[in-house]
Image: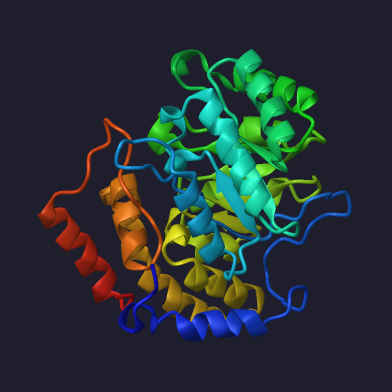
Amino acid sequence: MAFSARLTSPLRPILAALRRAAPGQHRGLSTPPGPGHTLDLRGIFPPLATPFSPTQEVDYARLEGNLCRYASIPFRGLVVLGSNGEYPYLVPRERLEVVSCVRRALPKDRLLLAGSGCESTQSTIELTVSMAEAGADVALVVTPCYYRGAMTSAALVRHYTEVADASPIPVVLYSVPANTGLDLPLEAVLTLAQHPNILGIKDSGGDITRMGLMVHKTRQEDFQVLAGSAGFLLASYALGASGGVCALANVLGAPLCQLDLLCREGRWQEARDLQLRLIEPNTAVTRRFGIPGLKKAMEWFGYYGGPCRAPLAPLSPPQVEELRGTFSANGWL
């Protein structure tokens, strides 16, 4: 599906500027990788939506089509099987097939992060090993939460330590309290940051004070903090976050990469102006309308969104109009 001139005109100047910017020539306040880093997470990662056919089967052809469009955007890499990928609704075979499909299409200079968190430590280890075999560069491991009352700091430190010990690829911690009802405790994060195979954390909670403390207290470690939402990306960068895993990047990838560039070059006024235009669309495709809203917005920008898997339901016509109005009011449509 081709972009229409009307829909894409606000994005063309951004893409052109990003193509002119050479990697490695940016200056800014984000935390540089330490001397022991084997993988540099600085940049934007879209957590890919999983495309389904009208019969709710994974549509790999549509996935490849979206990947072709994303190839022109200077993402640092891609995340598969995160919350926005409807990870809990995929069977194990589909999870591995999605990773393999994305790996085949992804340029070698871009990282592939794959969600491998399960409720038990043993299952998480087994899936992490399988993800590595399928081509993942990094395992993104969400907190186990079904027995959240028993998930003390000590239990979570033990869980992640055993996973990282057994994993053939680096591990990124994943705290998403909106979905799990569990915030990975700061003291656990600081302990786990010392593990040589734990690369960093994706924190989606939105507590900027907490993120600042993570950056501040892990400066001596080989540890990188990723903002888990576009809504607080600039604030996270100002405190030293390395990058962002942002649902909105599925829709407005180029503007988010532009925001990343502006922060790295210290152009804070321009960055603030752009950040302000991203807040409401980000809220709309996350907290307000969730994955159905994200997939609907993708279609307006030339990507395949398609249906969600049941029991997630499509938006109602009034919800679609509200969503469109949010993007239009901020100059994106």
In which quarter of the view is residue 278 placed? bottom left
Quadrant containing the C terminus in the rendered view? bottom left
Report the residue at 56% width, 56% height from top: 244
Quadrant containing the N terminus in the rendered view? bottom left
Visible in this render: residue 213?
Answer: no
Instruction: In the rendered view, tell whether residue 311 sits above or below residue 313.
Output: above
In which quarter of the view is residue 130 placed? top right
Instruction: In the rendered view, tell whether residue 8 sits above or below residue 205.
Output: below
In the rendering, at what x and y percent does residue 185 appear? 56, 31
Instruction: In the rendered view, tell whether residue 249 sits above or below residue 147.
Output: below
- Between 72 and 237, the one lying in front of the other is 72
Circle count: 0
In the rendering, at what x and y percent does residue 192 appear? 71, 32
In the rendering, at what x and y percent does residue 316 appear? 14, 49
Extreme-left residue of the structure: 318
In the rendering, at what x and y percent does residue 283 appear? 33, 56
Instruction: In the rendered view, tell whether residue 132 sits above or below residue 249.
Output: above
Report the residue at 78% width, 51% height from top: 39
Visible in this render: residue 99?
Answer: yes
Q: Is residue 199 left or right of residue 299?
A: right
In which quarter of the view is residue 90 placed? top left
- Between 106 and 48, the one lying in front of the other is 106
Report the residue at 67% width, 81% height from top: 21
Report the residue at 57% width, 28% height from top: 117
Q: How is the image coloured?
A: rainbow
